[in-house]
Amino acid sequence: MRSMDLIRWSGLAAILGVAILIISDLLSLTVFSSDPMEFVTTGTYLADGTARVLAGILLLIGLIGLYAHQAEASGVQGLVAFLAAFTGTALIFGTWWTNAYVAPVLAQENSRLLETGPTGVLSVAFTLSFALGAVGWLLFGLVSLRTRVYPRAAVIVLIVGAVLTFVPLPGAGVVFYVAIAWLSFALFSQQEAFAGRPERVT
């Protein structure tokens, strides 16, 4: 399989990852409204957590493809933005893994620790992980806006979505997910929002 085909299919991977995350978020607002301490030990919670872990893997694959498609045009700034977005997303993926497989153990062995939530260094680490992810995707969006490799409207939605991830409101991440899905669809279908060669960012 050609490298360009792999890049295209990474777009589909990201779309699937976003679909899983949106379904998971919707379920968390509706079905998963029971007692958290009881729910975290159920098979449903484990299945949902495992699905989010899978979504995290798919998002990382998709991000690699999104960057590879504009790597030449984005230059050093694009590489820096990609590394920040990839590292932040990987760290967020780590929190999803922890929630999926460590939280059920804590619920059974040390429920008090789970009830209080992360504190101290752990709280700071979680906050910095999500902050780095948001900043990384924001930078990725700004670079993409200049390269004009992806649809301009999709890139603008990505920038807005990255900013909204700082807002602790239910469903705030949906805009971000939609933007990634939009960009990934453009990648998968090879739609480009420019005529001729893309502008190189120096």
Image (cartoon, rainbow, N blue to C red):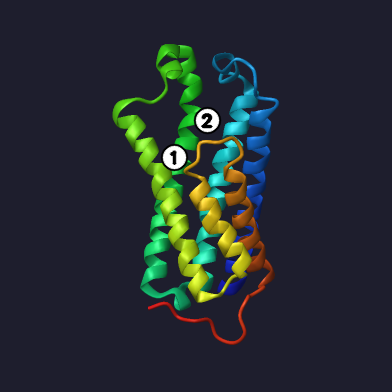
Q: Position of residue 196 (x, y in %)?
A: 59, 87
Taking the view exactly as shown, the residue that stands out farthest to the left is: 121
So how many labels did they put on this image?
2
Depicted 58 relative to depicted 3: above or below? above
Where does the image place residue 30, in percent across and percent down from the top left? 70, 27
Residue 61 shows in this picture: no
Is 172 on the left-hand or right-hand side of 139? right
Measuring from the top left, give residue 112's x and y in whole percent: 42, 12
Instruction: Check disc 1: other Cα within 10 Å, few if <14, some if 14-19, many if 20+.
Output: some
Q: Quick one: SS at disc 2? A: helix
In the rendered view, tell whether residue 95 sits above or below residue 186: above
- Marks 2 and 1 sit apart, C-alpha to C-alpha, by 10 Å
Asked whether disc 2 touches disc 1, contact meaning CB atoms under 8 Å apart, the reply is no
- The residue under label 1 is 94
Identify the residue at horizontal 61%, vertical 19% (top origin).
42
Q: Is residue 70 left or right of residue 8?
A: left
Q: Secondary structure at mark 1?
A: helix
Q: Residue at x 56, y 20 (%)?
A: 40
User: Which image quarter is the C terminus in?
Assistant: bottom left
Of the residues shown, which amino acid type is indicated by label 1? Gly
Residue 86 appears in which quarter of the rendering?
Answer: bottom left
Disc 2 crowd rating (10 Å Cα; few below 14, some 14-19, many 20+) is: many
Q: Which residue carries the number 2 mark?
A: 100
Task: First in sequence, mark 2 or 1: give its number.
Answer: 1
The residue under label 2 is which amino acid type?
Ala
User: In front: 129, or 47?
Assistant: 129
